[in-house]
Image (cartoon, rainbow, N blue to C red):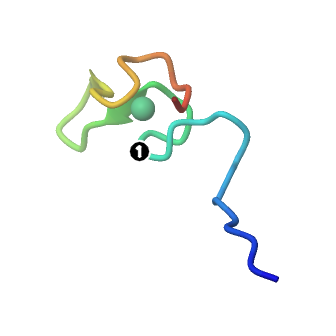
C-alpha cells in the first residue's frame, strides 16, 4: 500500500512557512514570490 504523503503543514507556503515574506539579514523583509505574500500554499 503506497500512500503518497505530502508534507502538509496546513496550507502554509513551504518557502516562507506561511509568513508571506522572507526576513532579510540586511534588514527589512521581502514579499514571498511563491505565494505573493499571502503565506498560503496553492
Ligand atoms: Zn510564501
Left or right: residue 19 versus residue 28 is: right
The quadrant where residue 4 appears = bottom right
Left or right: residue 27 versus residue 7 is: left
Q: Nearer the viewer, residue 6 or 19?
A: 6
For disc 1, the marked residue is 15
Q: Residue at 75%, 71% (x, y): give it.
A: 3
Left or right: residue 16 versus residue 29 is: right
Disc 1 CB within 8 Å of nearest ligand 1 atom: yes
> 7 above or below 35?
below
Q: The N terminus appears in which quarter of the rendering?
A: bottom right
Q: Residue at 54%, 32% (x, y): give it.
A: 41
Q: Where does residue 29 sit, x and y in percent of width and height?
A: 30, 26
Q: Residue at 27%, 25% (x, y): give it.
A: 28
Q: Where does residue 19 sit, x and y in percent of width and height?
A: 52, 29
Residue that lies at the very extreme toward the right in this rendered image? 1
Q: Where does residue 30 sit, x and y in percent of width and height?
A: 26, 25
Amino acid at each position: 500500500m503506497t500512500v503518497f504523503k505530502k508534507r502538509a503543514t496546513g496550507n502554509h507556503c513551504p518557502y516562507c512557512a506561511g509568513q508571506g515574506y522572507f526576513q532579510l539579514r540586511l534588514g527589512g523583509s521581502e514579499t514571498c514570490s511563491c505565494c505573493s505574500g499571502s503565506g498560503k500554499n496553492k
